[in-house]
Image: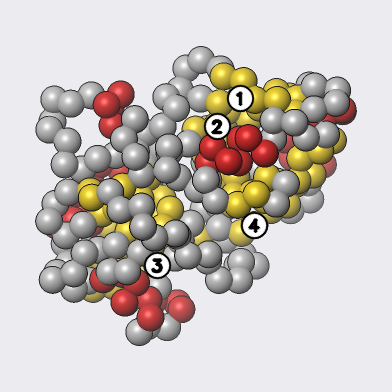
Amino acid sequence: GIHLAMGASSCKTCCSGGAKEAAVIQASMAPDESAEHAAVQAAEVLATNGTLATDGAFQPPMPKAAETLSSERHITLRRNPDQNIGLGLDALDATTAFVDSIIPGSIHDWNNTHPESECLRVHDRIVAVNGISGDTEKILAALKSAVEWNLTILRPVEVRVSVDCACFPTLGLDLKYSPNGNTLLISEVSDGALRDWNARAQSYKVRRHDRIKSINGVIGGAKALLESASSADKLDLVILHYEP
């Protein structure tokens, strides 16, 4: 895990023990391969042949206007089995599949030809597919094997948080990230600036499994997000918040 610790005049990053740095699931792994091996894999793109094929040529599209209300949604889509699925997914929270990117492929084409209410978006969390839930590896397997997907998803709202580094010794977040991912997963909220912010917040509260999308205007690339916090006197965060 990564822990953001802040000094009086700058925000620094340091490592904390416990959680793995990343946990990108590679669906083509043999059953006896370890999770630690999966943890160091690059971000992957789900393909129709039962593997996760790396393709770094495409940048993930930015989602459309942020929702005013985050909620659980149910959508049904049918993919073309003759095309790549075209989803970049990570499994950092172990129970849902997070849509990190959508590249040209079956889902991209579906989104271009169906109403917004029937589309899968970047930053959606896939909670269940065809009744399968609670285990990301099983969700990934279901996505690969089925042509029609009955999906339960969580769609985020964007929450903006500003933190003065001089006022808090730590942000109070344990973070995980995928090496080629574009967000930071909040794995725990402990004592620090964000817990204090939560105590004063009158609407959304930052919680476990939310994601940091932007730090001080930097978007895209988890490592770049961490670097942007390394010498800042103030942190302006854009957080993807999920309400069940």
Choose mark 3 or mark 1, whichever is in front: 1
Mark 2: few/some/many CA within 10 Å (<14, 14-19, 20+): many
Applied colour scheme: secondary structure
Residue 3: which disc? 1
Q: CA distance from mark 2 to mark 1?
A: 6 Å
Q: Amino acid at mark 4?
A: Glu
Q: Given the image, on which type of amino acid does mark 3 rest?
A: Leu
Q: Is residue 175 visible?
A: yes
Tell me which amino acid carries mark 2: Leu
In the rendered structure, which disc, 3 or 4, sits on the residue that comes first in sequence? 3
Q: Earlier in the sequence, mark 2 or mark 1?
A: 1
Left or right? Give the position of 76 relative to 162. left
Residue toward you, 128 or 57:
57
* Residue assigned mark 3: 120
Alpha-carbon span between mark 4 and mark 1: 22 Å
Q: Are marks 2 and 1 in contact (CB under 8 Å)?
A: yes
User: Which residue is label 4 attached to?
Assistant: 158
